[in-house]
Amino acid sequence: MLVIENCRLTWPDFSANYTMRVKSGTLCAIIGPSGGGKTTLLHMIAGFEKPESGTLTFNGQNILPLEPAKRPAAIVFQDHNLFPHLNATQNIALSIRPSLRISDDERSSIEEVLEAVGLKGFGERKPGEMSGGQRQRVALARALVSGRPLILLDEPFSSLDPGLRRDMVQLVDDMRRRRPVTILMTIHTPEDAADLADQMVFVADGRVIASDVPAAILGGSLAQKIAAAVSNT
């Protein structure tokens, strides 16, 4: 389980204080207004931002003292962050061996994850030879093959058209059901994840305003409370 308790961060023009829990194996969709603190939340979990106070544990381990490379999390950014001079296999291999000197077994694992994300036979292609959706699949494959149990997706599909975006969210759901991973995904279009996510978290003004099943967040009296809370921030 991911447990965040009163993790506070401050800047001259923004402050955040996060408290939330996510069960292991969960697909958690994080929604909220632009600039509300969704990306900051993921960056804090990944170790790119350090809270001034509070606790952050994953499966009982205190991960706050750990540097990003040593945390049990892999993050996928909106711009996929692939190296243009490396092919798909090499970009994925970086999460296993930064030297790119992979074993036959590791190469087989990469081929398996490429097939799992629908990119069988794409191993030799460079990012410039692939579509935006294909590049995002490579970035997702790199996170999955890392073997880390916590995957953080920072609006990785927002630039895709609605049909492909929905397909990618479905792919994320399929992959976490095959592998023992916990996935936190920020998303601008909550309807794309409403029937797939186990948990939905609403973040605004650097706070977790609400956390529940998607139906409760997106409809009924709780949705009205969320709207009121946002209007007061």
Image: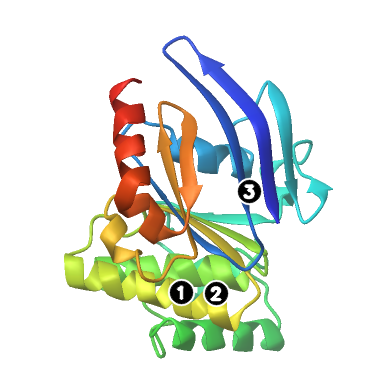
Check disc 3 and report its element: helix, strand or loop.
strand
Question: 39 above or below 181?
Answer: above
Instruction: In this rendered view, identify the residue nearer to me: 107 or 39.
Output: 39
Residue at the outermost right position: 61
Number of numbered discs on residues: 3
Residue 110 on image: x %, y %: 57, 81
Residue 96 on image: x %, y %: 66, 68
Measured Cα–Cα span from mark 1 to mark 2: 5 Å
Q: Quadrant of the N terminus?
A: bottom right
Instruction: In this rendered view, identify the residue nearer to me: 188 or 222.
Output: 222
Give yes or no for contact between labels 1 and 3 (Cβ–Cβ under 8 Å): no
Give yes or no for contact between labels 3 and 2 (Cβ–Cβ under 8 Å): no
Colouring rule applied to residues? rainbow
Residue tagged 1:
173
Q: Give the residue type at disc 2.
A: Arg
Residue 140 on image: x %, y %: 47, 67
Taking the image as shown, residue 205 lies to the left or right of residue 72, namely left
Upstream in sequence: badge 1 or badge 3: 3
Question: 121 above or below 91?
Answer: below
Residue tagged 3:
21
Q: Give the residue type at disc 1.
A: Asp
Give yes or no for contact between labels 1 and 2 (Cβ–Cβ under 8 Å): yes
* Residue drawn where x is 35% and y is 40% of the image: 32
Q: Quadrant of the C terminus?
A: top left
| Residue 126 in sight | no
Measured Cα–Cα span from mark 3 to mark 2: 18 Å
Q: Give the residue type at disc 3.
A: Arg
Residue tagged 2:
176
* Residue drawn where x is 67% and y is 72% of the image: 101
Check disc 2 and report its element: helix, strand or loop.
helix
